[in-house]
Image (cartoon, helix red, strand yellow):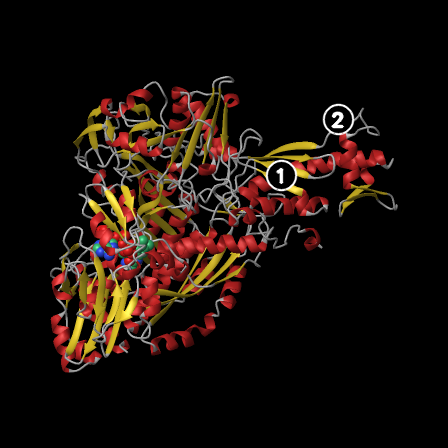
Amino acid sequence: MPKDHEGIGASSKRREDVRFLTGAGNYTDDINVNGQAYVHFLRSDVAHGRLTKVDTSEAEGMPGVIRVFTGADFEGVGGLPCGWCVTDRHGQPMQEPAHPVLAQGKVRHVGDPIAAVVAETAEQARDAAEAIEVDIEDLPAVVDMKAALKDDATKVHDDLSSNLCYDWGFVEENREAVDKAINEAAHVTTLELKNQRLVANPMEPRVAVGDFNRATGEHTLYTTSQNPHVIRLLMGAFVLGIPEHKLRVVAPDVGGGFGSKIFHYAEEAFCTFAAKAVNRPVKWTSSRSEAFISDAHGRDHVTKIELALDKDNNFTAIRTETYANMGAYLSTFAPSVPTWLHGTLMAGNYKTPLIYVNVKAVFTNTVPVDAYRGAGRPEATFQLERVIDKAARELGVDPIALRRQNFVTEFPYATPVAVEYDTGDYNGTMDVLEKMADLSGFEARRKESEARGKLRGLGLNCYIEACGIAPSQLVGQLGARAGLYESATVRVNATGGIVVMTGSHSHGQGHETTFPQVIADMIGIDADMVEIEHGDTANTPMGMGTYGSRSIAVGGSAMVRAAEKVINKAKKIAAHLMEASEADIELKDGQFSVAGTDKSVAWGDVTLAAYVPHNYPLDEIEPGLEETAFYDPSNFTYPAGAYACEVEVDPETGKVEIKRFAAADDFGNIINPMIVDGQVHGGIGQGIGQALLENCVYDESGQILSASFMDYAMPRADDVPFYDVDHSSQTPCTHNPLGVKGCGEAGAIGSPPAVVNAVIDALHSGGHKVDHIDMPVSPARVWAAMNA
Amino acid sequence: MYAFDFERPSTLAEAEKALATEDAQALGGGQTLIPTLKQRLAMPSKLVSLGAIDEIKGVRKGDDGALCVGGGATHATVAREAAADYPALAALASHIGDPAVRNRGTIGGSIANNDPAACYPAAVLGSGATVVTNKREIAADDYFTGLFETALDEGEIITEVRFPIPEKANYQKFEQPASRFALVGVFVAKYADGVRVAVTGASEGGVFRWSEAEAALSGAFSADAVAGLALSADGMMSDLHGSAAYRAHLVGVMTRRAVESAG
Ligand SMILES: Cc1cc2nc3c(=O)[nH]c(=O)nc-3n(C[C@H](O)[C@H](O)[C@H](O)COP(=O)(O)OP(=O)(O)OC[C@H]3O[C@@H](n4cnc5c(N)ncnc54)[C@H](O)[C@@H]3O)c2cc1C
């Protein structure tokens, strides 16, 4: 039935792809405002130093130069705000440094903007930027996190007491009980590891165009953002002091974000500010090289995890100590990532009764680090699933059996780390995986690989994530400075077509296809009667945007609520038209009928009546058919899954090849299976990128060594296998109207441990007793581990 | 980019003249030079494109049986047109970069640039080829003089590279994971008068001949002959993609594999 009108459950083709694949997309860089000037940022090429001179006099006289800005121009302007305040173990708020739009007094990372030239052309702006004379008195670069916390370490921020942003304990009250459980355990497995720094590298680099209308006093910012309303609020209220009604933020087609386009960046504030200051639209387009040193990075945790087990191999306690790199400043949501998005997931899929997570967030002279696909949850999953694998090997037990034995099986389940899983079936999902991955055929495949001189390994892991990032009151208690509801307006036109204006933002997720499927299903009309608008604060209700796999779970739910209001009103109109009681009206396949009769009116008749209310219950209801809803869920959603990876290692070179990859996910109900497959494929590709290839490396002086694709290895098509993906194991979310959980990050969360577990397994099969290799598990690292 | 003049002559003679301007520079396929310009790391006064000079774009068989590749021949041209006469060379060309790079990049540009991780230098040195310029002929052994350094003079144009065709040859490339240039590449070529083994990607001094392997293989052309050889890690490059010891080790592995695959 749903297939008839491409409703819920149909693998409808992505309608947005037509414009993306035919070059008809409208990205921010495609936007050129009449009279626009261009800005070039002069960025620091040293990691840490005191600005002793910024002389712009020569640059100001260069051809085409309109104006040169330095930090001094922003002294009366707010800094970039941080959207989350973490409270430390002692009940104190985190240390929160100022983050000026342009550097003031000091530069703190390679890429820190020192000055900005606005000129007639981009080349002229760049020429003039080269003519700015800058003297920097070098200071020692703070790069290594543990060294940064030593008493004699140079401070990144002179006005803070140290380089420690916070020392967070979770749950602090559990600390002693956890220590005791670990001391008394029959077995403790310990693992020290790094979750390396990554660069998001969306295909589209960031762009910002600021425009100011002198006649109306209105500012417009076109920007590559995952959440235009959030940018409007942060930039308007905290940086530039522009009220929302005078500020419009537009994020049109956005070519991928992966988290890096959530945050409010200096370049956005600059272009908005400068457009008014020079009375010209101002455009900035990041180069790829600039993106490496100005987009927020991801991950960068150094962790020690201990897993305690009793004599029967039941998990009894987990203790972790993590150093989380914040970089030089606090990016918008940076403090939340290693804490609330990481600590709350340390229970994983297991009923470990006692957990203590300690996180020290550290300032260093590096690019700020913030959420990147998965945000905290990949870090939690990686350490947990790696330590379980190591424990299984130490104890000589089957890694699947050990996991199954410790699975949470009863729901709802309150973890010892403050969240409550509403539903799940981890054994059922593992059953799906075991079959799909043909685990029983593994030994034969291993023999076949060995016959070709290769070492074959099998790696497994489970994951759980908290997504649908929401409940506002909860996140408020946890330190969020924003609400995390979502919104939608469902506007029905006179002839029955519908426009949904959502506060979510699509930058690759396919909302324009899936959201109409839901509406089509609810009303029983064709999905192509529904259009989705998003990305423009001028015509969408205040929404918090897209990240944390929240769009369908939170934004989709808001849309359902608004559509329910529309349907309820439409039923009133239909009842009036058919002179029936509202309670008897049924809506099916786009027809309103009166139960038990053959009377019916079509959807279009009712919508027309709403706008041409000649025969209409005007004394009861208003004309028109347009409703808005805000949805604030009562809990996170908890997608979970089990992944299996098979690798072949070339023992001569250390090169790892992924031969098979199977992903069994429980996303609850699914709107568009094809799009879900695609999200999982992409996520696994990114996870494989982290596991085998990607690595953002700084040297001791704070220079970034992997600052281009020549040295930063992105995953490519031939690095990944054909995936087996299954999401038939479904336990619908119990608290949102669609029973959906979200699927955007799962692949990136669930895949890195599977790959690394597989490599370690392969090495053991070749007699190499290697406990761990840090990601990326590059050929050189595998070879070094084998020959240690 | 900084501003520059541009010329696109159709004969070598015109190109020579155009290159006589101070700070003029030849432009081959632009696959190295254009990104360098975009980053403002070079500031030529004039770019002289060699792309319209038909006389240096072909692949032909020389009178002495050598395969003569025009200095302006693209990697794609070599992949196609050398396949019958010198399959190892064609295979090497067909694995440089991606199709866009292969359709633009030229052998002249590659060996003029002499990136220490580039593939062609291994083939040129491993084949004992002759680099022909508008002024002279330079033996491969004299041509490569260090990292990004060659025997070329300012403004000198590579017009042809003459490859003696070996009995057997093979190139094994172990890719650097990010750039997919050679982390280590080994070109082995067996001639009637001996075997040549050239290594790219590994050494701090750029492409070099591994003389121990050449001696062993000239005695017996088999993987076993080089199985026991180990190259010292001294002087090997070390970076985030591999230590000196790893590179030295890979040279041995790739040499053996090249011998096994030589055809
Ligand atoms: C994405 C990518 C991947 C790549 N992968 C590989 C790889 O795997 N292996 C590999 O070996 N290379 C690789 N390359 C480099 C590629 O082979 C380039 O084509 C080559 O290095 C330069 O050739 P070009 O014709 O583009 O020269 P250009 O970039 O035009 O010029 C390079 C230099 O050579 C000079 N020059 C050009 N032609 C001549 C001539 N006929 N005589 C004298 N001087 C000349 C120029 O003045 C300049 O100094 C890659 C490049 C890219 C962009």
For the point 23% across and 48% down, the residue is: B18
Q: Quadrant of ligand 1?
A: bottom left
Task: Say left or right for A731 vs A603.
Answer: left
Co-location on one chain, circles 1 and 2: yes
- Residue located beneath label 1 in the image: A559
For the point 33% across and 41% down, the residue is: A359
Crowding near the residue tagged with mark 1, few <14, some 14–19, many ≥20 C-alpha atoms within 10 Å: many
Image spot of residue A184 (x, y percent): 33, 53
Image spot of residue B131 (x, y percent): 18, 63
Image spot of residue B31 (x, y percent): 30, 52
Q: A250 or B36, which lies in front?
A: B36
- Residue located beneath label 2 in the image: A622
Mark sitting earlier along the chain (1/2): 1
Residue A291 vertical placement versus A90 (above, below): below
Residue A184 tag number: none
Split into 4 quadrants, where in the image is the C terminus of chain A?
bottom left
